[in-house]
Amino acid sequence: MCGMAKQAIIATIEGERADRIPVIPQITYGAASIVGRTVRELSGESDLMADALSRAHAEAGYDAIYAGWESSFNALAEAMGCRMSISEGGLPSVAEGVVGERGDISRLQPPDPEVAPTLRPRLETIDLLRERLGPDVLILSYIPGPFTLGGLLCGVDRLMMAVIQDPGFLGDVVSAAADAVVPFIKTTAARGADVLVVADPSASSSLISPDHFSQFARPYIGRLMDEISRAGALPSLHICGNTAPILEQMADTGAKVLELDHLVDLEEAMSRIGDRVCLQGNVDPVKVLRLGSADEVRTASRACLEAAGQTRFILSSGCEVPDGTPVANLRAMVEARDAFVSERA
């Protein structure tokens, strides 16, 4: 088993004393290059995804593992009927939504995750990782955020215009998106994921105001956090970009963990909400982890550790670890943590 046991990480999340600060980089499809494959080759293949994820975990030595292959809102959108396109890098994106007019909202049906071809491999990946890693390794899995999923269903441009021009339509779309996520939450938790991370990048303060977040995102995110807790997992929240204007609102959702992007000042975030929730982050995933040297990763990791202190904190990337990130750079995060904790022993 690599790193910290599951219960020690949970103790950190809950604000209890832990032996070490967990290191959990947000790596899913970024593991493809570690096994010498492309993202496209592994997408949808649960055994290959599990192989890549478990190998990255073993070689880099970090403490827990994300089960899945990128944030799952595209997979759920496709299961609900959206037309997809695949980038040259192998990642899916929605080419056309399914909500063209208000009447389409009532026809949306939550897909069965056990049956939907885009969702079932994600569940199988959890099964395979649990079988290989045993009961003492913490498994995280992404859950689609309702505001972002709503944008995929109706089109992101329309979603953003509706914030001002048609708030009733927007509320209905986001509510329907939240409804569709609930079965995925229940099934993912039942398959053994310990932490469910609601990923809602379109709800970022880089895109909408704090007031609009309060009206159109926070209530629905809060509902999903409650569903995750009822399903027996720990709720976490990831919103990309600069979320400094909404840190308190994010903590108000009921999340136990907040994943913070590298644009957020970690020391400020810790001073504002560090007594309420476990913070996770926030090494720059591109400039430092993907493109930097191991020494640069150690320096950036050290800066995060010093900003957070030896407290309720998980050292991580600020966002998804890009494909092509060297294993040595992931390992450097672990080395930085070990050195930091050793100095304070």
Image (cartoon, rainbow, N blue to C red):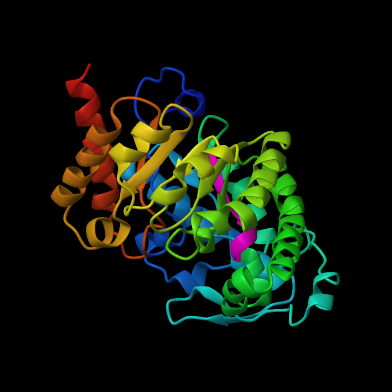
Residue 220 in the image: x percent, y percent?
67, 51
In this view of the protein, can residue 135 be seen by the observer?
A: yes
Q: Quadrant of residue 107?
A: bottom right
Q: With 24 as the anchor, is 211 left or right in this view?
A: right
Residue 174 in the image: x percent, y percent?
69, 62
Residue 58 in the image: x percent, y percent?
38, 43
Residue 96, above or below 174: below
Exactly how many numbered labels are in the figure? 0
Residue at horizontal 21 percent and vertical 40 percent from the top:
303
Q: Nearer the viewer, residue 107 or 125?
A: 107
Residue 197, above or below 345: below
Residue at horizontal 61 percent and vertical 48 percent from the top:
126
Residue 14, above or below 77: above
Residue 108, above or below 308: below
Q: Nearer the viewer, residue 126 or 274?
A: 274
Q: Quadrant of residue 227?
A: top right
Magenta region: 139-148
Farthest left residue? 295
Residue at horizontal 36 percent and vertical 52 percent from the top:
318
Is the magenta region chiefly helix, strand or loop?
strand
Q: Nearer the viewer, residue 242 or 177?
A: 242
Residue at horizontal 42 percent and vertical 50 percent from the top:
245
Q: With 289 as the anchor, is 169 left or right in this view?
A: right
Residue 81 in the image: x percent, y percent?
74, 76
